[in-house]
Image (cartoon, rainbow, N blue to C red):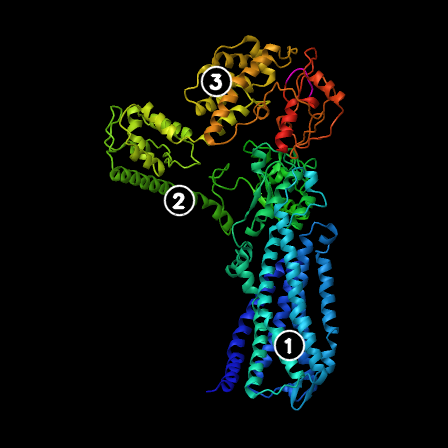
Amino acid sequence: MSSPTILPLVQTALVRYATSIVLTFGFIGNISVVYLFSKHYKNPCAFYLLCAAFINIVYLSLSISHGLYVLDHIDPSLSSLAFCKSRFYFFHVWGQMSRYFIIFACIDRFALTHRNVKLRNFSHINKTRLLIILVTLFWHIFPIHILLMTTIQNGRCGYFDLYYILNSVYSVIFVGLVPPVLMTLFGYLAFRNVSKMHRRIKPADVSTANNSTTNVIQRKDRNLLKMLLSEVSVYILTMSFYPIVVLEVSVTNAMNIQKTLERIQIENFMSYLSLFFIYLNTSASFYIYYLASKSFRKDCKESVYGTTPGGFSSAPKGWNSFPMQSLGMKFNQENVIQQCDQLVNELGEYGYDLCSLDSGWSVGANGDEYGRIIYDSSIFDIPQLADHLHRKGLKLGVYVVPGYFANDANKFVFGTNYTLSQIGNGHNNGLARIDLNYSHPGAQIWCNTVVDQFAQWGVDMIKLDYVTPGSPDNGVNLDTRNRPAVQRTIDNEPIIQRQQQKQQQRQEQRQQRLQETLAQQQNTSPTSLELEEDQNMSTSTGFATRILEKGMKPLEQFTGAEDQDISVWIQDFEETIEAAGGDSTTKRKAIVLYLSGDAKKWYRLTNVEDGEWSTFREKLVTAFTSASQQLKTLTKLMNRKQGVNELAQSYFYDVLALCSKLNPQMNEAEKLLHLLRGVKPSLAQNIIMFSPKTIQEFLELAKRSETTYAGAPSLPTATTEESEFTAVIDDENSSEQVAAISRRKGQPPPSRESQSSNNHYQHRNFPRRSTFHDPMYPIQYQATSQNNYVSPRNNYNEQPEVIHSRSYPQSQQNWDDHRQYSGSSRNRCYNCDGFGHIARICPSARRQHQRLNE
């Protein structure tokens, strides 16, 4: 069979079967897009895509249906001029509307991600609706020439003569070139804006974060951008064939080139193939979105699986304020809004859409005039909060304890003559609320009035306390007749018991598998690893099994990797063995069970002979302690200084731990030097006066100074001997150790200035003023005098958020330095608790500022 005969048959098969499949899947896909995006119709981009999908349904249904009809019937456009004109006109109008809706969706994403506020205002649902109307009107008016110039000649419906050439040029420009160019341009600009946004440093201050020039898009908008860019990519691939075919056919026809029958059939086939790709593009939106976005797939699954009778498609997901309150953070509306905004930005696409206020949002002693629960207006405005969350696509929940307040007993139930004392049973279980007697008709009425008021505020969910096992009166026999909710509540207890039993079984299975793994390691080791029983062990199992029998947490194996600290691991190993009743001999024999990777290779290759545990321990630590780790430890030790509100005992043991990690054989004199280097000035002045000879004397002096220095008169500042003492610390210890370890690592030793940058007594110039503020807490104290001996400021105001770095004349700096180190001043700094200066010229503030800038 020749090719001229084959191509018409292939084209007929494509029309009959391929386009039928495209029509079926396209119709289902676009219907699904319309349904899913109708839930997000207030989002401008989603609304553009929804309208494009709706137009695609109409376009596919009529265009492909016409092609299928004319396969076995006479084409009605050949006999009806009106049908001929309207077919070409409306098919073109609907196709262009769908394409340009996608273009405006790209423009919307570009505007949303732009830093310019005026451009971002373009991305608004009201402007989107207006633009959709304008696009619809434009594409019904602009191609009116098709309606006028389409005609029937020689039994064919189409374009003829000069208009054929003009229409071909028009189609190439407005169908084949302008849409992909605009989609690519604005899609790329939107992608570039998002990339810049990811590289941009977020402001630390709340006022800066809320500035109008700051732009943070939500996760669902980023997902829409990803879906849109995927659709644009597919559009460019499928539409790139169309202008080439149109140009080739129109140019050759305009040149009156004589064409063979075979060429005519090839051109007809290629023209249909380009049209088929257009059909394919308008049918693929749903499947592109499904592959590109995880949140879209989640929405699809929820739509398929349906919802519970309560309207939930899955377990409620959200954030509760209890962690904020338990951590001592300020529980108010401003901080709750910050948390909820972050929730929707980071986890919104995963279904986290609920923000719940725990106990503390309401007045805790009484209700309103009808005994209904009211919010504490000093920290919350519930209607305003609910409105903000709803605009973000979130829901608001509140915590409620059942019953009315005892102080409201004489108030009337709203709309009735019942008093609250009449609907209660007189029990309060030690709480401020009275339980309700639900057999009284007024009890349900009062509950309804409370819920109605919540609904007026905009509350979406109520977290009701004291209704689960463990609550007061949980064991009472409740009436379950026609009350399935009560029956489900009673059934909670055996469900919880079954869950606890399953959890216990899983824990036992994990422990059994771990015992088998350790036993296998013992049996497969190339050396004699079977541990002999100590006098303290009464079982015949191995020592690793003994650890499990004691219910202790199994120790992690040491592999020798860079991220494992051998000093920390060896200490944990010794503590574990000792807790299980082992001694030095047991440690030496059991260590091989906990080595793997490079550490196990080292053990085998070095042929370590049996000997004292201390000797083996030293070799192991030396082998896996790198110069970089030692340098990090030394740097941390050199920079370690006592915090403003840190207890001396905590500082003492932390410094000793660093000293032991750096050099287990470090003598007491060196440890004492490191302790003296970092102790805060308010304690150092007292400690140095008594010249402690041992680290225990240092600790006793530090504790004694902590209990006596608050409110005491200022002590003399550092003397010449003290300055020389500090210099000795730097010269004789720090420089030599840092230089030695730096040489081992192949790096130049740090400069003299960097080593002494954290010395409390270092004399430096710095800006006079600094402002300390934590955005999560209000400033509760303002200094009214420079002579603040005991500062009432809270700990959370000690870190600087904004520090002004303006400079002052040299004379002003010299005066500040004189006041800072003057021994005659009785001023006390509320930043570092030191004597002899005030907070605005505190050297600690400058060092904190330098570290923040670095």
Question: At numbered mark 1, what does the secondary structure look like: helix, strand or loop?
Answer: helix
Quarter of the figure that contains the C terminus: top right
| Identity of the residue furthest to the top in this view | 690
From where the camera sits, is residue 696 visible? yes
On whether residue 501 falls in the magenta region, the answer is no
Q: Where is residue 464 in the image (x, y as percent from the top left)?
A: 56, 42
Whichever of callouts 2 and 1 sits on the residue coming sooner in the sequence is: 1
On whether residue 836 falls in the magenta region, the answer is yes
Main SS, magenta residues: loop
Question: At numbered mark 3, what does the secondary structure look like: helix, strand or loop?
Answer: helix
Asked if labels 3 and 2 touch by Cβ distance under 8 angstroms, the answer is no
Quarter residue 574 falls in? top left
Tell me how far mark 2 sits from mark 3, CA to CA: 56 Å
* Residue wearing tag 1: 247
Q: Is residue 767 above or below residue 105?
A: above
* Residue wearing tag 3: 671
Amino acid type assigned to the residue bearing label 1 in the image: Leu
Question: At numbered mark 2, what does the secondary structure look like: helix, strand or loop?
Answer: helix
Q: Residues within 10 Å of mark 3 (few under 14, many from 20)?
A: some
Tell me how far mark 2 sits from mark 1, CA to CA: 73 Å
* Residue wearing tag 2: 498
Q: In this view, does 23 lie above or below 462?
A: below
Asked if labels 1 and 2 touch by Cβ distance under 8 angstroms, the answer is no
Amino acid type assigned to the residue bearing label 3 in the image: Lys
Whichever of callouts 3 and 1 sits on the residue coming sooner in the sequence is: 1
Look at the image and give the residue range highlighted in magenta.
834-838
Relative depth, front residue between 320 and 62: 62
